[in-house]
Each structure stands twice: as structure tokens, then as C-alpha cells.
Image (spheres, rainbow, N blue to C red):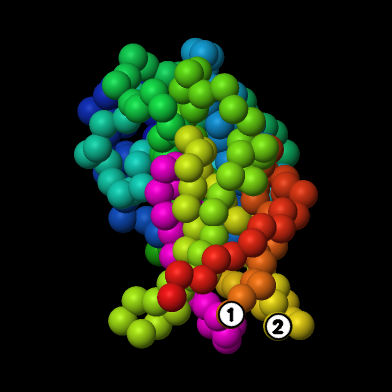
Amino acid sequence: MFGLFQWPSRTRATLAACAFTASFIFYIPVSHAVLALSGTRIVFDGDKRNVALTISNPSDKVFAVQTWVNTDADDQTTAVPFIVSPPLFRLNAGKEQQIQINGLPNSLPRDRESLFYFNAQEIPQVTTGQGNQLNIAQRTRIKFFYRPQEIKENPIEMLKTLSWSISKTDGTAHLSVTNPSPFHVSFIRLEIIGNGKTTKLDNSIMVAPFSTQRYDLQSVKPGPGLQVNFSAINDYGGFSTPTMLPVSVDF
């Protein structure tokens, strides 16, 4: 039986201690964890008080599940204006649990999205007779975007406003993308087309709002007439229709 279900109350101190312990347990991608989330990302609209997510247990085992929101730093000390309810619960085999992420008053930027991360940690049941068997608490971590209500644009339509260029730094050519929109853009596909061939770029890091991100060109030879072809992940975890845009060469 889980010792954690014998606690008389879930005090703030106890939850803080659990979260601190969680920081020492390694991150496991979604596809490797036992528990399944109803989405691969979360968008919290600023005009709403909360957002819901379902966690399901398709296995034949019982788990304790701990949930929380933190920042890109992945620490337990940086304050975030979100509370997950319930923060700790038992999830039986073949069952699911809906959780709610509640927003608190905040001073987050009003002209752009803010990035956080939602965490779900699964703690396996310890049964009598297991002896010294090692049980590993696996964690799923997905992106959590807070989108202020002042933002009215459509994130998919704003993809066409991205500008692409190739420049040299210390003699090395890089592809740069400038994002003039208030949205984070996560690429699922990024290719450069030119000189009669298509080259896929593997290091397609997300570009933040109102910022520029650089990518290694790999085997691409800079020259006139280059184009970039890309798809981005939408709010529901799907992919946008591929977009083709020109690439300028700045040297």
C-alpha cells in the first residue's frame, strides 16, 4: 500500500517536500512513461480561470501521481501563478483522473505568451515482499503556455510573418528565424530548398515571441534563391500546413 495515502492531511509543507524530492528524479519523455496525458501541450487562455487535463492509467498497476507547474529552469523555488488540483492522488489500473490547473493573479507580460511546464510524476506502488527492489518514479513534462487575453491574433496565421535569413558568425553560416509574433513557435518540420535539393534541419529549436533563433546549416551551401519549408505544432498538438518562405542571404 502507498504510504503517502496514510497521511492525515496534505499540508503545504508536505507538498513542498514532495516537489523538492521530485527534482532529483529524472525526466522521462511522454512516450516512455506509463501514464498517458490527454494532450502533448497545454494552452491556458488568459480570459479563463482554469484549464483541464486528463491523466489515464492504461496499465495493470496502481500509481500515486504528483502534479505541478514550474518554469524552464525546472526548479522547485521559482514561484509560478498556477495551482494544480489535485496535486497528489491515487490512480488505479485502467482508470483516469481529470485535473484542473487554476490561474492566480499575476504580473506576466500582456503582449506575449509566457512559457511554463506541466509535470506529472508517477510513483509505483510498493508491495509487501518486494524486498529491496528499486522502484523508479518517472516524470512526464510538457510545455504549458499562458496566453494573455489581450492577444487576439491566430497563431497559425502568424507563421507567415516569420522572416528567414542566412548570415555568418566567425566564418560559419547559420540560418536565422525572426519571430515578430506574440506566440512561441515549435517546428515539427524544417527544410531548406535550393540548388536542386531539399535538406532537412534536425536542430529545429523553438523560437520565442519577439526573438531570433539560429540553426546550424549543416550541409547546406548558402546562395541565392533559397527557400525554407516548415510546419509548426498547433495548440492541439497537431501540425500546421507546410509554409514556404524565402530566405535572404546577409553576406
Q: CA distance from mark 1 to mark 2?
A: 8 Å
Check if residue 215 falls in the magenta segment.
yes
- Label 1: state its secondary structure: loop
Residue denoted by label 2: 195
How many circles with numbers are drawn on the protein?
2
- Identify the residue at horizontal 73%, vertical 47% (top origin): 240
Residue denoted by label 1: 223
| Side of 3 where 79 appears, left or right | left
Considering only order in the chain, which callout, 2 or 1, is on the residue closer to the N terminus?
2
Q: Nearer the viewer, residue 188 or 247?
A: 247
Residue segment shown in magenta: 206-222
Q: Position of residue 7 (x, y in %)?
A: 35, 27
| Side of 28 where 192 appears, left or right | right
- Label 2: state its secondary structure: loop
The three-letter code of the residue at mark 2 reads Asn
- Identify the residue at horizontal 70%, vertical 83% (top origin): 195
- Identify the residue at horizontal 46%, vertical 29% (top origin): 146
Q: Quadrant of the C terminus?
A: bottom left
Report which quarter residue 197 is drawn in. bottom right
